[in-house]
Image (spheres, rainbow, N blue to C red):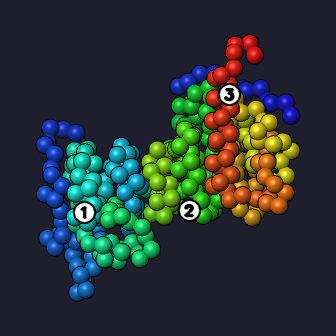
Amino acid sequence: MKRRKHSGPGAGGPGGGRPPRRPGSSHSQDATPEARRSADGALQPRRDGAPGDGRYWIYGHHAVLAALRNPRRRRARLLLTREAEAQFSPEIERAQERLGERLELVRADREQLEARLGPNAVHQGIAAEVLPLPSPALEEVLAAAGRRAILLVLDQVTDPQNVGAILRSAAAFGAHAVVVTQHHSPPETGSLAKAASGGLEQVPLLRVPNLVQALEGLKKAGFWCLGLAADGTEPLDRAALDGRIAFVLGAEGTGLRRLTREHCDLLVRLPTRPGLVQLNVSNAAAIALYEWAGADSSAEGEPEGA
């Protein structure tokens, strides 16, 4: 299939003096309402903060330390064991310098962390209560994208583990954003952030009210929208992956919806064996990103005029 000519802007690219506090000097335990304990010693839920403001707990050192480094995070409440405090002291000090009083430290033991996060959370002795990140406008991301750019568009992918894993791959391969629908997509949660392993802090997660309109906006900005489908007309490794690309992926089982398919420029398939028609959506996203990155490397190795 002949590639559509780009009609958009595809050719152009776009404190204070307080000394740092030592970790431990600002711990609130029994002295503050945040750390008030019940009779069994468990930390009580916080009672302050706006109701329904979306606060949630990130856990695991990769996710938490990435959140503390993210300038878009303006406030955090850090819950950590003595061992984690000692291990991650330099990172905590840098976060204190950046956030000042907006970073609250609460020391806890592992039982208290499990009471807060649940027994199955792999927290590694550290967790942070944060607000959801603001979702940038699609126009902002498109304006910052260069001549060669990659986006991932998810059509009602609802599993937070899958979305988190996709964000992790997106960060690894330099994707500019992951686009999801406002409805039928998971909110920011600890399990999503854990699966993203820091990718949530590096790759913007955009929420759009209408996916078809978003695809049309991408096309106007010079993006070639490739839908991944088992019945795609062309193998992915034969598709033109230069310029601005948006990979569109559907939920497992249902795949891409009819209108989403119709608004893709081309449906492509992964060259899987006949016995296994469908991959996990996060695996499919990682393979597509790898193929895109490989196409970039191949293009750089070609002599001029080839």
Q: Mark 2 points at which residue?
A: 161
N-terminal-most mark, 1 or 3 = 1
Looking at the image, residue 25 lies above or below residue 42 = above
Q: Name the residue under label 3.
A: 298
For marks 2 and 1, give the one nearer the viewer: 1
For badge 3, the amino acid type reads Ser
Neighbor class of circle 3 (other Cα within 10 Å; few <14, some 14-19, many 20+) is few
The foreground one among 268 and 29 is: 268
Q: In this view, does 157 lie to the left or right of 17?
A: right
Neighbor class of circle 2 (other Cα within 10 Å; few <14, some 14-19, many 20+) is some
For badge 2, the amino acid type reads Gln
Looking at the image, residue 283 lies above or below residue 51 = above
Q: Position of residue 170 (x, y in %)?
A: 56, 45
Looking at the image, residue 294 lies above or below residue 271 = above
Q: Are marks 2 and 3 in contact (CB under 8 Å)?
A: no
Kindly state the secondary structure of the residue where label 2 is placed: helix
Neighbor class of circle 1 (other Cα within 10 Å; few <14, some 14-19, many 20+) is few
Q: In this view, does 8 lie to the left or right of 88?
A: right
Q: Name the residue under label 1.
A: 83
N-terminal-most mark, 2 or 1 = 1
Residue 215 seen in render: yes
Q: Is residue 37 left or right of residue 19?
A: right
N-terminal-most mark, 2 or 3 = 2
Residue 221 seen in render: no
